[in-house]
Every structure is written in C-alpha cells, then in structure tokens.
Image (cartoon, rainbow, N blue to C red):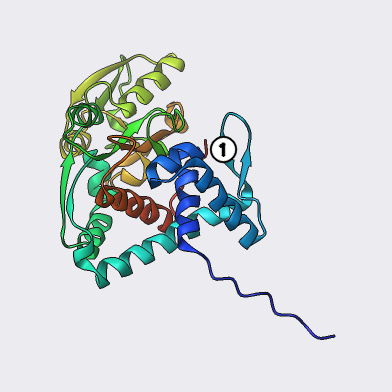
Amino acid sequence: MPTHKPKLVNLDLDLIRAFVAVADAKSFTRAGVRLGRTQSTVSLQIKRLEEQLNAELFSRDPRKVVLTAQGEALLTQARRLLRVNDEIIGEMFEHALEGEVRFGAPEDFATTHLPGILGDFARAYPHVSLSVTCDLTLRLMDKMAQGELDLALIKREPVGADVGQPVWREHLVWVGAGEDVLAKDGPIPLIAAPSPCVYRKRATAALDAAGKPWRVAYTSHSLAGQHAALRAGLGVMALPSEMAPDDLTLIGPEHGFPPLADAEIALVRAGKTLSVAAERLASFILASLDGAGRPTVAD
C-alpha cells in the first residue's frame, strides 16, 4: 500500500505569539491587552492555530483558561521558536528595537541563572539600554510601585498568576558547614536574609511545625555574606538546591531536619502594557528558562 506523507505545516509565528501570550496571562482578554488586540481577535488566532495543528491547546471554562496536555507540550517549543525568531530579527535589524528596559532580580537568582540570558539579550539587541538592579524582593516591589522598574523576577509564595507570572519552582534544602554546627542543646542557629524573605519563612515554618526551637544567628542581605557565615559554621540555612555550594553539607531527615516547602520565582510587569523592548526581554527570559530544561510552574 502506498504511504501518505503527513501534510507539511508552516507555523504562523503571529499565532504562536498569541498562544504564548494566552498561556502566560491565562486569559484571552489580558493577552489581548498585552498584544494590542481585541479578545475576539486573540480567540480567533488560537482557534486557527488549533485547526492548523489539529489539537486542542486550551480547556476553557467561565473562570479561567488552562493549557491542555497538548498545549503544555507545545508551550516550551513555542517559546523556543519565538526566541530564535527574535534573535534573528535582532541581528538582521538591530536598529528596529531601541529603548530602555529597567529590570530587577534577587541577587542569588541573578548571579546563578541570569548572566548568560541577559548577555544573550544584550548581544541580540545592542541598541536596547538594559539596566539591571539586584535587590531583595520587597525592595524590588517598592521600586516597581515607584515606577523605577519595568520588569522584575521576585521570590514569593506560590499564589498563581494573579500577581506576576510563575516561571520557576525552587526546591529548598538545608545547608550547613557540617554536622558539628548543629546545636546539641538549645535552639537551632539559623542564617537568613532579613524578613520577609521566603527562604527564611520556609525555614522557620518547617522548624515550628516540627516542634524544633530555633534562633536567628546571622542575618545578611548579601548571598556572599550568607555563604561566608555558613562556611564559618555559624548555623544552617534554607537554600535552593541549585544554589547550595559544593563545599557545604546538605542537612536532611537523618539529622532530624524537616522537609522544606518549595518557593517560587515569578515575573512581574510594571503594568498591563510595556514597551516593545520590555516585552521582548520578558519573552526572552521565559524562553531561555524553559529552553534550558528547567521546571516551569503548574498552577
């Protein structure tokens, strides 16, 4: 029997961009605002893409829009397509994208995950003036409220998409210089950032739930300062597993320590509409994180 080759489909990047916008905003209306289009136009674009792929990408109910399994599978690849497209456009038409983008991120996340991403963005769009601020989440949110930032990655409780866009789930672990730093008698010494740090809250909540007394032995805004205190044996700390230094010890249930709940990194925009350059950076960051094979957050 003759075999029939599947029909070759050329994806329309406008439809792909609309799909990613709806997936990010979890709303056709909010996606339309971000894209500068009406809700009905965005809905029609998604319908055309579903027909083109012969797949249902979203399950819809009156309250929210949720990705189907097929939509989840497409999202990472869709971000990659848009990033490649934007990089090509940036290289071919460098003059086409100009402006200033003011971006904020926590120091630890910025130093661990973002340098390569921001470097790639700067090379792809050399006429965009990128200003990066590293600070605590509370201060970043204050700066955004005062109109000093366009975009920020923040640490927060997993609260869904109402405030910011979830992009990263952080698995937290206990870290110390060794078992000898654990108090034999008395409260557990903690190293932490100042309140209201999510990691600090996770640590104290877990110890309280386990009925273990604790005290804050060292507080520092700086990740370098926290690591120095850990290496000096001043206490233990809750850190994302990817940020735990290799020369320190993971402290777990075998030492009587309770598990820690995950934290979340979310991308927050200063308003419903941003400059083209700021939206391009947001898409670039999201595509880069997904493309690196890191876990995204499922609401």
Judged left or right of residue 31, residue 129 is left
Residue 216 rendering spot, x and y as whole percentages: 24, 19
Toward the bottom, the furthest residue is 2
Residue 44 higher or lower than 151, as above or below: below
Residue 220 rendering spot, x and y as whole percentages: 17, 29
Picture residue at 77% right of the left edge, 82% below the top? 3
Quadrant in the picture for the N terminus: bottom right
Q: Quadrant of residue 201?
A: top left
Q: Nearer the viewer, residue 49 or 170?
A: 49
Residue 1 higher or lower than 294, as above or below: below
Judged left or right of residue 279, residue 14 is right
Picture residue at 45% right of the left edge, 26% below the top? 258
Q: Residues within 10 Å of mark 1 (few under 14, many from 20)?
A: some
Under tag 1, what secondary structure?
A: strand
All told, the count of numbered labels is 1
Residue 238 rendering spot, x and y as whole percentages: 33, 32
Q: Nearer the viewer, residue 236 or 171?
A: 171
Whether residue 285 is visible, yes or no, is yes
Q: Which residue is mark 1?
A: 65
Residue 57 higher or lower than 157, as above or below: below
Q: Quadrant of residue 205?
A: top left
Whether residue 167 is visible, yes or no, is no
Residue 72 higher or lower than 157, as above or below: below
Toward the right, the furthest residue is 1
Picture residue at 20% right of the left edge, 26% below the top? 142
Picture residue at 29% right of the left edge, 30% below the top? 236
Q: Nearer the viewer, residue 105 or 199?
A: 105
> Residue type at mark 1?
Val
